[in-house]
Image (tube, rainbow, N blue to C red):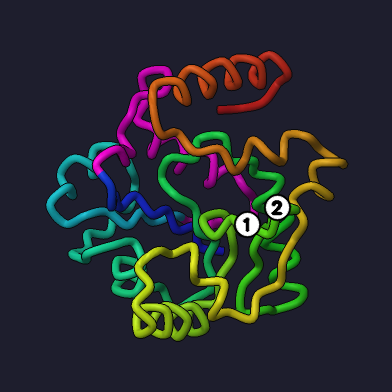
Amino acid sequence: MLGLILAFPEKRWENYTLPVNGEPVVKLTERRLSMAKRIDRAITIVRKDKLKTYSLHVSNPVPVSARNKMGALLKALPDEPFFLVEGNMPLIMPFLVNYLAGIFYENEPEALIPVWSDGSAEVFHAVYEPDSLREAIESALAEGYRSFSRITEFLDYEPVSIEELAKKNPKVTLSFFRVKNSLDLAFVEKTIEELKARGESF
C-alpha cells in the first residue's frame, strides 16, 4: 500500500521540520510509516515553494500549489488506496498501520478511519480509496468547508475504535500524537528513549 504524508502547513505554527533528536519531524514520520510491512513506498505532499527544503528530508516529495490541505490532497491524489498521515506524527506505530491496512483490504470500505469514544475521527491516520475521497473532498469544498476534519460527513467510512485497540496495546494511542510545539518535542524525545529501551526501532 502507498503511504501518503501530508506536510502542507495551513497555519503559521505548523512546522514539519521541527527537530526531534536532531532530525526533522517529517523525516522521522516517513521512516516510521515506511517500517510498516504493508507500506511499500511513501510520498510526501509539500508546498511548491518549500520543495527545496523538503527534498533534503524526505524521499519522494510531491510539490503542490493549493490554499489548504484539502486542496493539496485533491491535486495530488494517487490512483490507488493509500494510508494517509500528517507530517508531524513521529510516533506512528507500524503494527497499527499494518492492522488498519489489513482491515481495509478485507472489508473494502470507502475509507477506514480510527475514531475516539467522543466521536472525533483521526482523519490523518486513516486508509482511503482515492475515487471516494475525491468525491468527498469536492462535495465538502462545494459546501464551503475548508477543514479536512469535515471529510467524514461525506464518506461512507468504516470506523475503528481507538480505545478498544488501546485495551490490547496501550502504544496504539501514541500513534496519533502530533508535534505542534517545543513541549510536544520534549514528550516525543522522552517517549522515543523509553521505546528504544524496550527494543523499539526508530
**Magenta stretch contains residue 135:** no
Residue placed at 70% from the left, 52% from the top?
A: 116
Which element is circle 2 on? loop
Quadrant location of residue 169? top right
Quadrant location of residue 65? bottom left
Which element is circle 1 on? loop
Label count reads 2
Side of 160 where 195 appears, left or right: left
Report, in whole angstroms, how far the alpha carbon at label 1 lies from the one at label 2: 5 Å
Residue placed at 54% from the left, 20% from the top?
A: 187
Q: Which numbered tag is attached to residue 120?
A: 1
Question: Alpha-carbon neighbours of circle 1 within 10 Å: few (<14), some, or many (≥20)?
Answer: few
The magenta region covers: 12-41
Q: Is mark 1 in CB contact (under 8 Å) with mark 2?
A: yes
Rendered location of residue 97, percent (x, y): 65, 52
Question: Alpha-carbon neighbours of circle 2 within 10 Å: few (<14), some, or many (≥20)?
Answer: some
Task: Give, as a three-letter code, the residue at label 1.
Answer: Ser
